[in-house]
Amino acid sequence: MSHPVVHFEIVGGGPAALRDYYAALFGWEFQVGDAVTEEVSRPGEYGFVGNAGINGGVGGGTGFAPRVLFYVGVTDVEAALRRAEELGGERVMGPARAGDFAVGHFTDPEGNLIGVAGQEETR
């Protein structure tokens, strides 16, 4: 697979309760910190989970709509977002950068929210 799924997110208005739920349900353990950008989750409310098969996170906070989202690994987030738009999708966010890591969100032609993520040169 040229572009694998590299991360997932579960977001909602009560991230601590969501983390408790998934910890009890699946035995996931979380390291709580900050997401790459405040557009993804409130600061200090993002719980990274590394024992779920692929890396993921549970976060959000007041004002964040519930969603489940996966991220596809790409080498150039901006280029991937542009290509998604060319093919009939719509950019929702990004690229948002933290150091040399970037993320972006787009909707496909049916309205499904998809993420792209990757290491990039600092611009």
Image: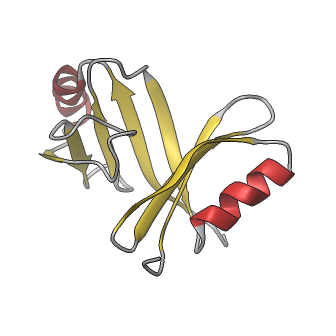
The residue closer to the viewer here, 21 or 100, is 100
Quarter occupied by residue 43: top left
Please, is residue 18 above or below residue 75 in the view?
above
Please, is residue 39 above or below residue 85 in the view?
above
How many numbered marks, from 0 up?
0
The residue closer to the viewer here, 111 or 19, is 111
Residue 98: x and y in percent read 34, 63
Name the quadrant of the N terminus.
bottom right
- Looking at this view, name the residue that lies furthest to the front: 123
- Residue at 74 percent across and 58 percent down: it is 82
Please, is residue 63 above or below residue 6 in the view?
above
Residue 112: x and y in percent read 67, 32
Quarter occupied by residue 90: top right
- Residue at 74 percent across and 39 percent down: it is 108
Q: Is 47 positioned to the left or the right of 9 in the image?
A: left
- Looking at this view, name the residue that lies furthest to the right: 87
- Residue at 31 percent across and 44 percent down: it is 57
The type of colouring in the image is secondary structure
Quarter occupied by residue 11: top left
Residue 54: x and y in percent read 39, 56
- Looking at this view, name the residue that lies furthest to the bottom: 121
- Residue at 43 percent across and 46 percent down: it is 8
Residue 2: x and y in percent read 67, 72
The residue closer to the viewer here, 22 or 47, is 47
